[in-house]
Image: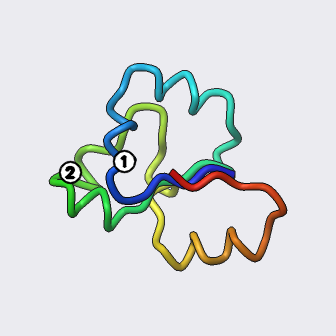
């Protein structure tokens, strides 16, 4: 699982991000909606290319990842 938070959400604007999103199941890739908003992006009108709206998640989701899976990456 991969969860982008804080400043790493800017990586979602890189052209390579779309390639990454195609390699990971929808359920296993998310970004922090609050971090996205704090960095000046709109979580409704500007969902990163390669993601769908349900992949815009909360830190509570991030906490669940920590308990749920044995391997994860937080960026």
If you read the primary sequence from the N terminus, does the residue marked by circle 2 or circle 1 appear first? 1
Q: Is residue 56 above or below residue 60?
A: above
Local SS, label 2: loop
> Which numbered tag is attached to residue 41?
2
Q: Nearer the viewer, residue 70 or 40?
A: 70
> Looking at the image, which residue is at 21% across and 53% down?
42
Residue assigned mark 1: 9
Name the residue at 26% across, 44% down. 46
Of 1 and 49, nearer the camera is 1
Tell me the mark number nearer the camera, choosing from 2 and 1. Answer: 1
Disc 1 residue crowd, few under 14, some 14–19, many 20+, Cα 10 Å:
many
Q: Mark 2 touching mark 1, by CB under 8 A? A: yes
* Residue 21 position (above or below residue 63): above
How many neighbours does mark 2 have within 10 angstroms: few (below 14), some (14-19), or many (20 or more)?
some
9 horizontally vs 40: left or right: right
Residue 8 location, x and y as percent? Answer: 39, 47
Pinpoint residue 74: horizontal percent, then vertical percent: 57, 55
Identity of the residue drawn at 20% across and 55% down: 39
Colour treatment of the image? rainbow
> Percent position (x, y) of residue 6?
35, 59
Residue at 57 percent across and 70 percent down: it is 62
> In the rendering, which numbered label is found on residue 53?
none
Q: Position of residue 44 (x, y in %)?
A: 27, 54
Determine which quarter of the picture holds residue 68: bottom right
């Amino acid at each position: 699982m991969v969860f982008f938070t804080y400043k790493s959400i800017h990586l979602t604007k890189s052209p390579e991000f779309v390639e990454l999103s195609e390699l990971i199941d929808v359920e296993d890739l998310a970004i922090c909606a609050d971090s996205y908003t704090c960095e000046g992006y709109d979580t409704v009108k500007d969902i990163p290319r390669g993601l769908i709206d349900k992949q815009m998640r909360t830190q509570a989701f991030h906490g669940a990842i920590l308990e749920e899976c044995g391997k994860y990456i937080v960026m």
